Image: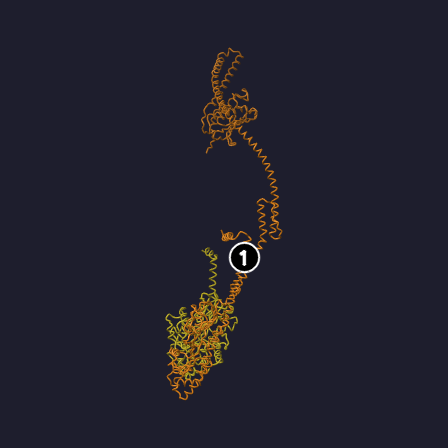
Chain colours: A yellow, B orange
Amino acid sequence: MLRESHRFFRCRLSRVLLFLVQVLLIGMVIEFFFMPPVFAADTDLTLHPLYSTYMFNRDGKHIYFGTQPFSAPEGIIGEVMSHDAILKRNLKKLGIEIVFYPFFNGPDINFFMKQDKLDMAISGDMPTLAIAAEDKAIITGIAKLLNASIVTRRKFGHLLDLKGMRIGVPVGTSAHLGLLTVLAAANMTNSDVQIVPMRIGELTAALEENRIAAFSAWEPTPSAALTRNKDFVVIHRFLNSSYLYQSKLFAERNPEASLQLHASFLRALRWMNESVQNMQKGAEWAAQTVEKRLGKKLNLTPDQIASIANEGIDLFARFPTIPRSDFRQNGFLFKAFNFLNENGKLPAESSWEKILRNMDSRILRTLLAQQQAYDLDSYEPD
Amino acid sequence: MTTTTSVHGYLERLLPTSLRWRLLLVTSFFTIALFFMIIAANQHGLPFGLLEGHYRQKETEAIRQMSDIADDKKEQISRWFKERQGDLRTIVDYSDFRNHLLAVALPAQYTSEEVTRSSLLVKEKFELIAESYGYDSIELVDSVSGLRLFSTIEGLNNTESPVVKELFADGSDWNEMIFFSDTGSGNSSVIHFVRMVFFDTDELGSNSEGFAVVFNIPTAKVLSYILYSTGSLGRSGEVVLLDSSVRLLAPLKHPLRDGSRAKPLSYYISAEPAKFAASGVEGTMIAKDYRGEPVIAAIRHLRITPDFGLGMVVKMDQEEIFAPLRENLAHSTLLMLSGLAVLLVFLSFAASWQFGPLENLSEMARRIESGDFTARAEYSGKNEIGLMAGAFDNMANRIEHWHAELESMVEHRTNQLQKANIQLADEIDERKRAETEVQRLNSELELRVVDRTAQLEAANKELEAFSYSVSHDLRAPLRHIDGFIELLVSRCRDDLSEKGKHYVDIIGSSARQMSALIDDLLKFSRTGRADMHMETMDMNKVLHEALENFSESFSGRKIEWIIGELPAVHGDIALLRQVWANLLDNAIKYTRTREIARIEVSARKENGETIFSIKDNGVGFDMQYAGQLFGVFRRLHSEEEFEGTGIGLATVQRIVSRHGGRVWAVAELNRGATFNFTLSNTKEIINA
């Protein structure tokens, strides 16, 4: 038997197999020791090193708002709201204290909102659709109307030049859907390129190091990339939006507080849109939060972020009600909903009708009709 | 057959055999291929980005151009819309003017003087703006009823604005809307900028939610210069504007596939660039437009309001873009063909120049082959062909010289051969004659032999008969003589004198001797007449049987017998026993003078026959008389020396002859003799 096994290991095929097994083992070791933990939305994010420090006190005297300081302009909106003295004062009158928690992405926010730990948040189109489709939240206003982009090197003048190349994208997001859309526009399919799943923060470095030939991402990542490397160009853009939404339970539990938060939202938008300086101030607050609380660094200066954010809110700053055109049948968000469904990102009971039912602009309309009463044109930073 | 061999075979069959034409064809083929490859590389570039072809460059250039124009147009359109929006916002959001609007919209809430003053101000303002910017009209419309509360067009006050009413009836949440409507007059359309004027219901105590300020702007008047100033787009280029439903907003430059003209606001474009532009995608596309023509298009999306977006396609036909390249290609092809023609002429000349000497060489070789050894290439070039021609000429010289030598040798040899042939013919004739003579003589000889054999046989028979008769007839008187001698001796011996007695002894001895002679002769005669009974026998046994008969004759003598192993033979046992008896008798008799006689009997194989031998150490004989040994009554010793009749060896010879063998003797005087015989006709039986 020993002789037979010895003969086996002298066989070339066995050596190849042995090599592959070794590579696999080494890869597993590397992944275990060196790869950062990936927390998907359905893993227990309460164990996340940052999120595990968040306290959620459901005593009725605390409200929790989820922000994404990485994103522009929604991150700035959240930061401006967190510095809104009028909001805090009005909530205090209701005996409520508000706490703003920063998160890395929308799915993380949704994880906590579904656990009734977060009451309101601003997130991108995909996570917003996901939680609305699960009947857990109500979409009340729009927080961003911007473009996401496909960034590549200057030598690639057209998407067809990227045939067979590696394109980095956060899978399951609007950037992913946008990439598939522009591939279709160029008569290509996802099998014509190599889609490489990546986190939003890894894309620019990967492109610089030529690990990928292009990436698809939402702002401010494309603008940051273009600023960092003059060889980078945008070859395609597609729609990208964010929304304000609140937990259904919160809306039922505390409508007055909800109203105050929405008023703060309107106030923040108007204050940001009022002047470049205001927007830059908000961007500074967002950069500080990213650095101090998330332990990261934004790749853009506050004024660069402010410029992007201004473009993102310019169309609706004074009237951020939900644009119905994006939610029409066969519109971009309808396609986004189908995309999430096809990729198994939504529970079986999700439906487009639920999303439509969970859209409500009446709060904002009510506030807009009582601008003075809710001090919509005033802002006091704390 | 390998693939290479089969390809070579196919090419050999396909191509002309002439090297000259092959060179021309192959060179032309490769030159054309090279030209096309160069043109193709020049036009389309090389893979892996090694070389960017003209088509690729042109495409990149066109993409850049479309993108630049699209960005420019987008900027212009966006700016134009922003300016209109700005105008509206200024009117609506400017608080002082807003109050005048409120007074016009809600006159019940104000005094008549305030309403009148506000109406005048609003009219003045609206008319100024409309005239300044070329608007069709500016209106103030109630959001619930859809009634025009004010219009710059006379006579429209308090009339229904159906389009705006439909807009309000939607119940959507918006504060600013932009939309297009068809004026019903062919290709013309109107853009409506609508902005809600909200007010606090509690503040004014009104049930109305609000009203709207509407700018009505003719599309053709204001967008035409943006959309149709496309000089850099060439003959086929155009800018196409659509709404989010892919509905055409401005007239197209080209007719549709069926030749008809698409009507703005009624026609929905199904081309891919338009659909993607309307859905919010920006970038460049290489696709087909609404006519089905391949175009390079830059697509842009303009988000004017949260609920209103425009799609824009800036495109140009690929045919027009690449037309210069196709012209270049045609020129290049023409140039290539011209160059090829020149090349072919040159190659033809070169082929003649290079292959001419080869063809001459071939002709010279053919002449030599046909026997003309004077053919020479006589090529003085210094190249490889010159070397080959030189070598050919040397070879031809050699061949000529060898041929001459060979001819001479052949002639000489031919002469020799002819002579030899003549001689041979003579010899053959002679031989034939000799053969004929030999045959004739042979025939005669055979006849003679037959005749002589018959005579000899007859003579032998007569002789045998005579011998038998004589011996038989002679024995009777001898018996009488011997008998009466014995009587005489026995009865009258005393009466005889000594001399008489001696004479009687002599007569008796002679008679007895004669009797013995006759007996032996009789036996000899019998051996020649008796029938042979052939059988296989053990020669050892035959020898010992013969030896037993002599046991008394050599008793008292010292005889050393050396008897070897004798093979079995095929013959007449009685006759062969007689042979052994006679030979043994001789050996015993002629070794009598030896103190120890030595008699050796053996058999050996020589030249395929078995030779039986009896060797003794007796008196031997002189070999010059060896031929007489086997004659009848021949003796080499006297009777006084050794008794005998001289018939024994003759008998041996006769018996051996009858067995097809031969007998001979070898001896040396006083040293002994060896008698040998063979039985060639007998079959030697090899005992298993």
Q: Label 1 sits on what residue type?
A: Ser
Q: Can residue B376 be seen in this view?
A: yes
Circle 1 marks a residue in which chain?
Answer: B
Q: In which quarter of the image is residue A340?
A: bottom left
Check disc 1 and report its element: helix, strand or loop. Answer: helix
Q: Name the residue under label 1.
A: B28
Residue B357 vs residue A319, the one in the foreground: B357
All told, the count of numbered labels is: 1
Residue B106 vs residue B230, the one in the foreground: B230
Q: Quadrant of residue A125?
A: bottom left
Q: Is residue A33 visible?
A: no
Q: Is residue B518 above or below residue A232?
A: above
Residue B176 position, x and y percent, is 42, 79
Q: In which quarter of the image is residue A63?
A: bottom left
Q: Is residue B229 above or below residue A89?
A: above
Residue A186 vs residue B593, the one in the foreground: A186
Mark 1, Cα crowd under 10 Å, few <14 / some 14-19 / many 20+, is: some
Residue A268 position, x and y percent, is 45, 80
Residue B63 position, x and y percent, is 50, 69
Left of B411 or right of it: where is B172? left
Residue A263 position, x and y percent, is 42, 81
